[in-house]
Image (cartoon, rainbow, N blue to C red):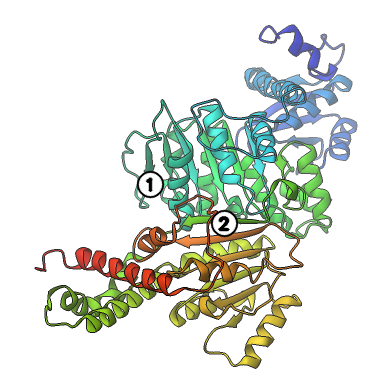
Amino acid sequence: MTDYTPEEKDLLPAYLLPQPTPRRVYGTLSWNRRRKCWVVKAEPSVTEMCKRLFPGSGGAKRGEARFANHRRLVGEMCWLMMRFPLEVAPRDKALWDEAVSMARREVIRREQAASLPRQMTPPEGTFTGELMSFQQEGLAWLMARDRGLLADEMGLGKTVQALAWLASRRAFPALVVPPAHLTRNWQEEAARFLRLNGKPPRIHIIRGLKPYDLPEADIYIMHYLLLRGWKDALPSLPFQAVIFDEIQELRHGGTEKYSAASLLSESCQQVIGLSGTPIYNRGGEIWNVINILDFHFLGDWESFSREWCYGYGSAVVIKPDLLGDYLRREGLMLRRTKQEVLHELPPKRRLVQELDWNDKVYAALMAPILPDVIRWKQDGTLTASQRAMLEQSISLHARQATGVAKAPYVCQFVRALLDGGEKVLLFAHHHQVMDAFKKELKAFSPGFITGRETSQAKSHAAERFMIGKTDLLCVSLRAASGLNLQRATCVVFGELDWSPAVHSQAEDRAHRIGQEDSLLCYYLVSPQGSDAVMQEALGLKVSQFVALMGDTPLSPDEAEENARCARRHVEQLAQRLCPDASA
């Protein structure tokens, strides 16, 4: 106990303090290296009490009880040994002392956390953003622990809070593990919010299943699908912190991906998970997720399924709310809903988010119009009207190619929103993009309001959404006028329009009288294709909230500006697709 200050010793309960030499021992305590657990071998009265008091301690043999090497369970074993002293096997004495020290440090940390500030801001110069009050509370909560699950509802800024945590801990190099479609967004957000010695952090996106020598960087980003290939390499890399974004991706155990994540988490001291949908009705899923963050925090699977679910082998939690309360009470999870922090949120929030896209699909769709681009660039005989018509055709084709190339990633994003309980209006322009939505999101039984449907079919789709028969309604950008869809909690733009007024009108389908939530409007953009040009035309900057949007129908001047935007778009396409062609 020489490593503890007097103040720390005062925080420890009696059962974690050194005990006097016992007059009698009731059995032995040893470490099972094959099963990786502590084994009590003692009189039947002692092992029977272990099994009665501690679910999951039961062993296969009579007169034997097993405990996982979890800091909480080790503390409980110390408590038990005050009544029934056990002799620790000599070869395992150092390992037991280390386990007891781990249990003591956990108790001290939890007691000290109660006196820490309820709100924190990152050190000056390390973080460029400004946290809202509840986000400052989230940062304080993260700073008080090495492992935890930040489970705020979608749209409350989990990414920003996690980056503020990295900045405050200066835990670099760090590894971020997001879903594939959010890789680029993490790259953009980290570059925007973090500063190291006055400069943006060095960021490296890990690619491919085959490990290679990583360049020096402050932040590494690797999506979940690559974990299995790097399973053996990751634990030996010097990461100071790991962030598992959308950690529900690890809710299924028994896979190489899960095994790699488990080994990675075990090798790093500071690990946090982010998820807006942390509690599932199927207990096996949340049990797997928590095991990544804190192994056996919820006991072994047998005891968890027996005590929290409908019996051994059952994966359905009886009372998910009670489980959520337990995780919050024990300090492993923090969750805030939009309703709880609604007073801090504006009525409408706009967020531009970069997604990945499929380069090959885009290239294949653009190949047929390459002759038109060359003609537009080289043919001096075209009249002004012919050039204008060709510009519109090329621009429209490029917009469609962009929409189709990013459609699968838009669907992944929307699927996460729906899994989180959001009611989504998904806007797009082209029929081919809508077809992709219909195929990828079929499981959610979406409604459609496009130029293909009859008036009766459109009314039926809107009614299904408003009465709760579906939580997803796909709407054409130019078909949004006159609709009243205030049940929506999220508006998602899978494609962009040249006109700010079109987006504003689409947003207002949900932001109507009767809308009591803070409406979140996502503009999902790709890094290339037509989106980059359209963002500039709309005044959208990646990962920034947008304050200015038009609220009136197109004026003649605005229509002319749209034409100029399309012209600039074609000029950039021509330069990119055929740079060597003479003008």
Front-most of residues 476 and 203: 476
- Residue 387 in the image: state x and y as whole percent: 23, 79
- Amino acid type assigned to the residue bearing label 2 in the image: Arg
Q: Locate residue 369 relative to residue 175 in the image: left or right.
A: left
Residue at the spot of label 2: 350
Quarter of the figure with residue 169: top right
- Residue 391 in the image: state x and y as whole percent: 28, 76
- Residue 375 in the image: state x and y as whole percent: 16, 78
Is 77 situated above or below 421? above
Distance from disc 1 to disc 2, alpha carbons, whole Å, reads: 30 Å
Q: Which residue is at a point 72% across and 49% down the rendered structure image?
A: 301
Q: Locate residue 571 relative to residue 430 in the image: left or right.
A: left
Question: Which quadrant of the figure contains the C terminus?
Answer: bottom left
Of callouts 1 and 2, the N-terminal one:
1
Q: Which residue is at a point 68% across and 87% down the rendered structure image?
A: 460
Instruction: Tell me, yes or no, if residue 387 can be seen here.
Output: yes
- Residue 304 in the image: state x and y as whole percent: 77, 49
Secondary element type, mark 1: loop
Residue at the spot of label 1: 206
